[in-house]
């Protein structure tokens, strides 16, 4: 049974859900999971539908045919084949916990993605990446060569046909031009909660303030540094007895988990941009299942 997804955004009004359900039924498709959100503050409507078909669905014909149903509601919509893995470029500097976590999840099928390359401004993880038969690109970045380096990065992304860039603790600021060109297609992980404890040594800042919760935020990258639409967040408890280094160690785990969950949501088309916020629908049944146990 082939599995597909339909994502829809439009202004909220009566009849949207019926139009979608009727079109899928008329084309021999069975809805297996559905989520919707009506933002009464903006009047925007968001919907994600998973569906199956006994036969192979021609998504080009489905897209063309749906135009008649979508037009009265001015829907923006896309059909997706859920068997097609999204192509991803991972970027990393010298903190490797998120990279290693993603490689493991990819290897066992917990993240059904196609990692088409890893870019770093250091050589630390070349062997790890190459041992996974993934292309590794070391692109040094300095104040003098930043424009040239970013052009090389974008060339790697475009040549690989990547749909998403994941900043897995990549410690370089991207230009406004790159952020705009890849809008909604760059995901970052940030230690601690945004916008608190920005800059250098955020865990030390948290320690000095005596916080009892530290966390991580994964968000889309925009030209406003670390202020893009938030996809996923989580926390871990700390106590007065723990050191700044304890904070860092505990933070590594929550950063890895939050980034993986954000990527999972994005690749399954569960994230919708809604101004400077996001709508994130729950995962469909079975979408967390791994191909292998370990």
Image: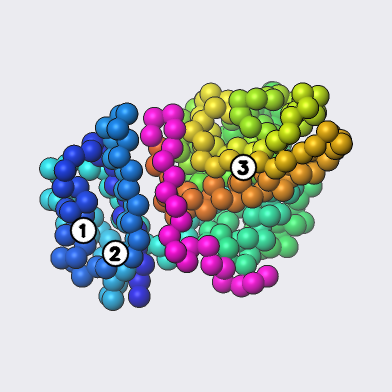
Q: For residue 122, say whether it is visible.
A: no
Residue at left offset 40%, top offset 37%: 273
x and y percent of residue 137 in the render? 67, 47
x and y percent of residue 225 in the render? 58, 25
Residue sitting nearer the eye, 80 or 195: 195
- Numbered badge on residue 21: 1
- Numbered badge on residue 31: 2
Residue at left offset 44%, top offset 52%: 282
Residue sitting nearer the eye, 22 or 162: 22
Q: Is residue 209 above or below residue 52?
A: above
- 266 relative position to 12: left or right: right
x and y percent of residue 206 in the render? 75, 28
Residue sitting nearer the eye, 147 or 234: 234
Label 3, label 2: how far apart the Cα atoms are: 31 Å
Between disc 1 and disc 2, whose residue precedes?
1
Q: Is residue 132 above or below residue 170?
A: below
Q: Residues within 10 Å of mark 1 (few under 14, many from 20)?
A: some
Look at the magenta stretch and give its main secondary structure.
Answer: loop
Magenta segment boundaries in residue numbering: 274-294
Q: Which residue is mark 3?
A: 234
Secondary-structure class at tag 1? helix
Residue 170 lies in quadrant: top right
Q: For residue 278, say whether it is visible.
A: yes
Residue sitting nearer the eye, 237 or 182: 237
Tell which tag, 3 or 1, sits nearer the viewer. 3
Residue at left offset 29%, top offset 35%: 44
Label 1, label 2: how far apart the Cα atoms are: 8 Å
């Amino acid at each position: 049974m082939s599995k597909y997804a339909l994502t829809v955004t439009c202004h909220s009004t009566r009849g949207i859900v019926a139009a979608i359900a009727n079109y899928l039924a008329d084309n021999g498709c069975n809805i297996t999971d559905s989520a919707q959100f009506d933002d009464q503050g903006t009047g925007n409507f968001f919907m994600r539908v998973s569906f199956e078909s006994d036969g192979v669905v021609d998504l080009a014909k489905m897209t063309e045919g749906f135009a008649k149903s979508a037009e009265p509601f001015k829907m923006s919509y896309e059909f997706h084949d859920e068997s097609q893995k999204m192509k991803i470029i991972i970027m990393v500097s010298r903190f490797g916990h998120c990279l290693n976590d993603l490689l493991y999840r990819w290897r066992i099928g917990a993240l059904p993605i196609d990692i088409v390359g890893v870019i770093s401004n250091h050589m630390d993880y070349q062997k790890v990446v190459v041992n996974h038969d993934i292309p590794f690109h070391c692109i040094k970045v300095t104040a003098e060569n930043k424009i040239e380096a970013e052009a090389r990065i974008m060339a790697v992304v475009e040549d690989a046909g990547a749909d998403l860039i994941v900043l897995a603790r990549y410690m370089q600021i991207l230009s406004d031009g790159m952020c705009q060109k890849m809008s909604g297609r760059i995901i970052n992980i940030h230690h601690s909660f945004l916008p608190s404890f920005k800059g250098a040594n955020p865990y030390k800042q948290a320690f000095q303030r005596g916080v009892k919760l530290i966390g991580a935020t994964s968000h889309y990258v925009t030209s406003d540094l670390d202020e893009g639409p938030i996809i996923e967040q989580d926390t871990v408890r700390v106590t007065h007895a723990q050191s700044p280094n304890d904070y860092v160690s505990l933070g590594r785990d929550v950063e890895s988990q939050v980034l993986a969950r954000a990527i999972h949501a994005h690749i399954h088309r569960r994230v919708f941009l809604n101004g400077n916020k996001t709508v994130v629908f729950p995962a469909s049944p079975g979408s967390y299942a791994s191909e292998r146990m370990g």
